[in-house]
Image (spheres, helix red, strand yellow):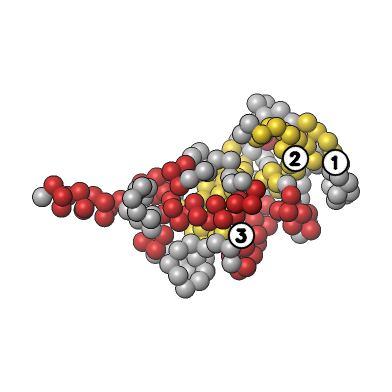
Amino acid sequence: MKLLMENWRQFLTEKKWEDFDHPKGQWADVSPDDIKSSQDPLNVDLSDELFDLIDNAYEKIGGHFDFQNSGDLPADHDDWLALDWDEDPEPDALRIGRHKPAGIKMTGAGHDGQSQSKRAYIEKTLELLKSPGYYAEMSKRIADIMIDSGVPYVEDPELVQKALGPGKEIQWLGAHPEGKHPDYNGWYRRTIEGHPGELKIMFGTPK
């Protein structure tokens, strides 16, 4: 009887993406509570599926600062959107955010490596950053894509500092230190998760 109850308890808590019956081809909200409650170190579950997307997207730059394994999800990131577009039952693209006083700060992303999955998360990012109240700090290739797509950015250092909060000091540069994107004067450096001098620019329209 005890073994039967334990197996039943696991059946109730171990959930994968496919168990939520989200429509194919449509972005769906993922509850942080569902991510937490599905975590099981012995079985593949929703947190594992989402972490695989994050790990794949950030592998070349050493991983996401906040997510080193599936047990780190969801942390204090409380806005999760995922998409499944292909024939298999796993999610294919992911967009992560966090509610802040200035709006929803986009804090991470993920994809399974397929071209359509990458395109889907980029398109969703563009859509959100062109909507009032969404913003993100970006750099490298993803910043290039946002600039090429005409996404608005914040060029006032006081507004950037206000959106980040007083505890996150910035070193304002204005122009890109390597002369890239001369029409975009919103570059700055700051320490992120113990990594000093991270080059960033803020896109979107924080409140």
For the residue labelled by badge 2, is the local secondary structure a helix, a strand or a loop?
A: strand
Q: Earlier in the sequence, mark 2 or mark 1?
A: 1
Give the image location of residue 40, x and y in percent.
35, 48
- Amino acid type of the residue that numbered disc 2 sits on in the rendered structure: Leu
| Observer able to see residue 127 | no
- Look at the numbered discs 2 and 1 and tell me whether their residues touch, using CB distance below 8 Å: yes
For image coordinates 74% across by 34% down, the residue present is: 197
Residue 147 shows in this picture: yes
**Identity, as a three-letter code, of the amino acid under mark 1:** Pro
Depth check: give the residue in front, 60 or 169.
60
Contact between labelled residues 1 and 3, with CB atoms less than 8 Å apart: no
Q: Residue at x 45, y 47 (%)?
A: 70
**Residue position marked by numbered label 3 in the rendering:** 121
The image shows residue 187 at horizontal and vertical percentages of: 80, 41
Instruction: List x then y, in percent, for residue 89.
Output: 43, 67
The residue identified by callout 1 is 177
- Amino acid under label 3? Tyr
Using the numbered discs, state the Cα–Cα distance from disc 2 to disc 1 in whole angstroms.
9 Å
Mark 1 element type: loop
Q: Is residue 190 above or below residue 2?
A: above
Q: Residue furthest left?
A: 1
What mark, if any, has residue 199 been given in the picture? 2
Residue nearest the viewer, comparing 146 with 152: 146
Residue 29 tag number: none
Residue at disc 3, secondary structure: helix
Q: Is 189 on the left-hand or right-hand side of 85?
A: right
Of all residues, the one furthest to the bottom in this rendering is 87
Which image quarter: residue 176?
top right
- Which comes sooner in the sequence, label 2 or label 3? 3
